[in-house]
Image (tube, coloured by chain):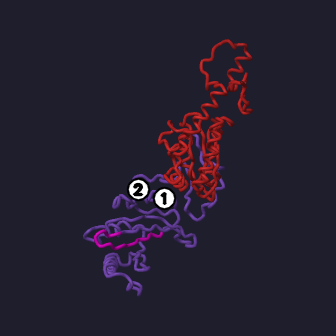
Amino acid sequence: MTSPQDPRHPHINGEMVREASEREVRMLAEGNVDRPEEHVPGVAIPAQLEKLLGFGRSFSWWPLLFGLACCAIEMMATAGPRYDMSRFGMEAMRASPRQADGMIVAGWCSIKMAPRVVRLYEQIPDPKWVLAMGSCAISGNVWDTYNVVQGIDSLIPVDVYVPGCPPRPEALWQGLEMLRDKVKQSDHAYDRVRVIPARAAIGE
Amino acid sequence: MDSTVEQISDALKSVFGKLEEKFGARLLGSSVFRGELTFLVAPEDLVEVATYCKAPEGLGFDRLEFLTGNHYPERIEQPFEVAVQLTSMATNDRLRLKVPLKEGQKMPTLSSLWPAANWCERETWEMYGIEFEGHPNLIRLLTDADFEGHPLRKDFPVRGLVGGRIRTDLKGKI
């Protein structure tokens, strides 16, 4: 049985594979194809297994316990008993990025916080999803000043944007539902762009 | 003594009398607003006046509530002002000292009298560019270490037109 292929990922014989690295292309050109790779970054996972993993992940997406400003209050309300994220397997907000599946950037990010946000993002193991919550995280809002990052997507790849000032828990919840759809499809922003904007900005 | 002094409490009247008696003409002025007493002090007299205000045998204002700056561009001669708010924990009285400053004029630190002044002075220096002589660690407190300029000055641009969307150089920081 063949699965409908996701056009974003290269497939060979129904199995999702990664793109060849520059080194592999060079080796292919040099005719060194038989030499084993010393280090293979990433693994080729069959599409069926990826689907199953995505299904599982979507019911236990644990965000990073991380809030920047007033939006974090609404995020806490979403986690609290009235709106209760735990109904959907998101109750375990992990205080360590190593245990998280993604982050909700809730609030405006000052330029002093920017390196920390990038570091936290990079410490989350792949695959990871990012939700930008509130106008400040999306665009800087009215804080077009010396001290505020004008949109968190200039630092890290963002999957879902939830506008509002701050968005109500219902709005955040809709954003999280959209995120869950992406988790089910194993579709995350970094996978598509393969670049972290903050790293690209300094040429790394 | 002007008529507004009548509005303040008896305790503050005694503070007013003692300060006037001890420093007299060296004080640049005083004002009363809604029962709050303020003295204008020259920067070279500040440490002496503050020491007298703090000492138990003096006025006993033992707590520094805050120290902050102000920028008044319309005052051509002395556009800057540092405000020091003092409290007496024993009597619950409050006294404000204000130090008018010229552009680039330095003022002495109060961090040896009140350790709490340390961070207040760092912030005042960072935001207004008012330098505190004798401060043990006058470095930026709130903004990035490589930030340039003093953002609470009135001539600092309100909108951040420089630096693009990130507005900092992340090289070496991430």
Observer able to see residue A144: no
In the rendered view, would you say B57 is above or below B116?
below
In the rendered view, would you say A129 is above or below A35?
below
Numbered mark located on residue B81 in the image: none
Magenta highlight range: B87-100
Residue under label 2:
B135
Residue A159 magenta-highlighted: no
Residue type indicated by callout 1 = Trp
Q: Are marks 2 and 1 in contact (CB under 8 Å)?
A: yes
Residue under label 1:
B125
Among the chains pictured, the one given red colouring is: A
Where is residue A156? Give x, y as percent: 62, 42
Front-most of A124 and B151?
Answer: A124
Q: CA–CA distance between discs 2 and 1?
A: 11 Å
Q: Secondary structure at mark 2?
A: loop
Observer able to see residue A23: yes
Q: Chain of mark 2?
A: B
Structural crowding at the residue carrying mark 1, measured as other residues with C-alpha within 10 Å and reported as few (<14), some (14–19) or many (≥20): many
Where is residue B73? Give x, y as percent: 57, 69
Q: Give left or right: position of B173 versus B24.
A: right
In the rendered view, would you say B110 is above or below B139?
below
The first of marks 2 and 1 along the sequence is 1
For the point 65% across and 13% down, the residue is A35
Structural crowding at the residue carrying mark 2, measured as other residues with C-alpha within 10 Å and reported as few (<14), some (14–19) or many (≥20): some
Chain B image colour? purple
Front-most of B118 and B173?
Answer: B173
Quarter of the rendering occupied by the N terminus of chain A? top right
Front-most of A18 and A26?
Answer: A18
Where is residue B13? Give x, y as percent: 33, 81
For the point 53% across and 69% down, the residue is B79
Q: Chain of mark 1?
A: B
Q: Secondary structure at mark 1?
A: helix
